[in-house]
Image (cartoon, helix red, strand yellow):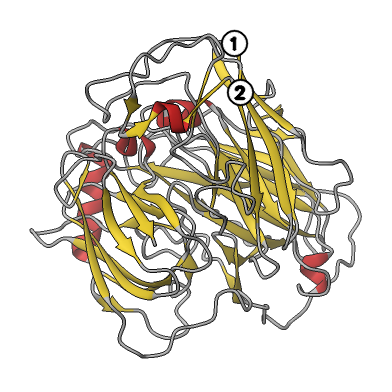
Amino acid sequence: MTNRLSRRSVLKIGSGVGLLSLTATSIPALMSVSSARAEPNPDILTVREVGGMPTYNGVSPGPSFLMDPGGTLDVELVNDLPALNDDCTQNMNNFHGLNTTNLHTHGLHVSPTTDASGEVDADNVFVSVVPKDQFVPCSDVCGESVAATFRTHKTKYRFEIGENHPSGTFWYHAHKHGSAARQVGAGLAGPLIVRDKLGVMPDYIAQAPEKTLMIMNRGLVLAEPGGGGQTAPTLTMRPGEVQRWRIINAQAAGNAFAYIATNITDLEVYQIAFDGITLEKRISVELSDNREPWLNPAALAPGNRMDLIVRVPRDAREKIIPLGITTGLTDLLSFGSNTNNASLYIRISGDPVDAVWSGDDALPGPGPALPGFDDAELPKRVIDFTPRFSIDGDKYDASISQKMALGTSEEWTITNSTGGVHAFHIHVNPFFITHINGVELPEGSPLRRWQDTIGLPYQQNGRPGSITYKTRFETFKGKFVIHCHVLRHEDLGMMQTVEVA
């Protein structure tokens, strides 16, 4: 405990940015999403500048996409940004192709290559869509063939999920290497919700109105389902009301780890899902918990999502509750302190309501798509996040760094041999956390769960931090990536290509 608090003091005073606070440009964005929304998903996402910043269909965050298990999402991505002619580069690990874009569905278990027909792009982050007048004179960019992977002006994407795909909160964003940090930081991100199957969730969750909070660089927005929305909102809840909040940490500016904190007791907050995967039981959120993000079940690394059920006691009096949703930044430790706080205000007002509730904390869990692991020994793999934005000592070079066989399970340990905090993310296949810093998590620990992104503990006293997980490589062959979800780090080389064959 003493070492941890000492480390935090160093981070707040002398590091790049404090671990427990929110920079002025790192404020959560709020958005309402109805699980029963009638209007269809948009067919087209057009990336165009508004006020000098890239947007989806002229707004940020982008429109919400809703899917059902077993469903298909078809969308055409159109790049109407100005031509920059900056794709060709001698160093793939720098900022380039700043107006070249693509589309990634973060957290979905979908094909990393094409749809089932083999003719339409799926979640292929090696695809690049250039503005219609942009000229690409080189034959390859970032190790990928321009002829094979570059699309001019537009391309169609098809994302197909299985009948047993977990329902929950996911998101989409730009993922072109060299421009991901700039584009996501500017707001090229939006919610993607896989709806619950009827009758699976308890009634108090199924009947709860929904809000989706997006932590973005651009500010606090109560957004419309079609995208964009009102800035600096206050949420209103009646005594006895229950709401479902979907929180997405879409921050791209630095190592932003989000926390929820308040000293007001007139609000019951329970976690029901993490990274789009429903928990086995709801967990009461300790609103004063400010432990490091890998030790705090309700902390969000960049890319993480969390679903909450929020309940106001029926006898609560009219008041406004400041609910602190704060992020802390820890990047390179040589930076000076830069800390601010922001609050989401909850107005308790109106006549009491008798919303459906249950004293039973049991939840359906991840479902048949993600069965548990037995004690059988699994093949092991160790991957090290190393200094100067590298993995295993090397910057991204487009070669296949890890190769796995379809249908196999493995145990991976991800180590962090740097003094900064990074966020590990893998595409396509989620993982089940078993150890943090070499210590096995006990059965029933709220940290022993499925995720697709996790903050990596930093190196202390020369000993790397680490997380260990188990995972399965199922359904899809093809190459995809692992990377730091502090997207500036990814653009500068903290990424590897992996392949399931």
Q: In terms of secondary structure, where does tag 1 sit?
A: loop
Q: Residue at x 52, y 37 (%)?
A: 342
Q: Position of residue 318 (x, y in %)?
A: 79, 50
Q: Residue at x 51, y 48 (%)?
A: 113
Determine which of the numbered discs, if any, sits on residue 51 in the image.
Answer: 1
Residue sitting farthest toward the left: 462
Determine which of the numbered discs, if any, sits on residue 55 in the image.
Answer: 2
Gap between marks 2 and 1 measured at Cα: 10 Å
Vertical side of 458 occupied by 221: above or below: above
Q: In terms of secondary structure, where does tag 2 sit?
A: strand
Vertical side of 473 occupied by 39: above or below: above
Nearer to us of marks 2 and 1 is: 2
Q: Nearer the viewer, residue 335 or 341?
A: 335
Q: Nearer the viewer, residue 136 or 70?
A: 136
Near mark 2 (Cα within 10 A), the count class, few <14, some 14-19 or many ≥20, is many
Q: Tell me which amino acid carries mark 1.
A: Gly
Please identify the quadrant where the C terminus is shown: bottom left
Q: Position of residue 411 (x, y in %)?
A: 32, 74
Q: Which of 201 and 162 is in front in this view?
A: 162
Judge left or right: residue 310 versus residue 440. right
Vertical side of 203 occupied by 387: above or below: above
Q: Tell me which amino acid carries mark 2.
A: Thr
Q: Nearer the viewer, residue 88 or 40?
A: 88
- Is residue 320 visible in the rendered image? The answer is no
Residue sitting farthest toward the bottom: 375
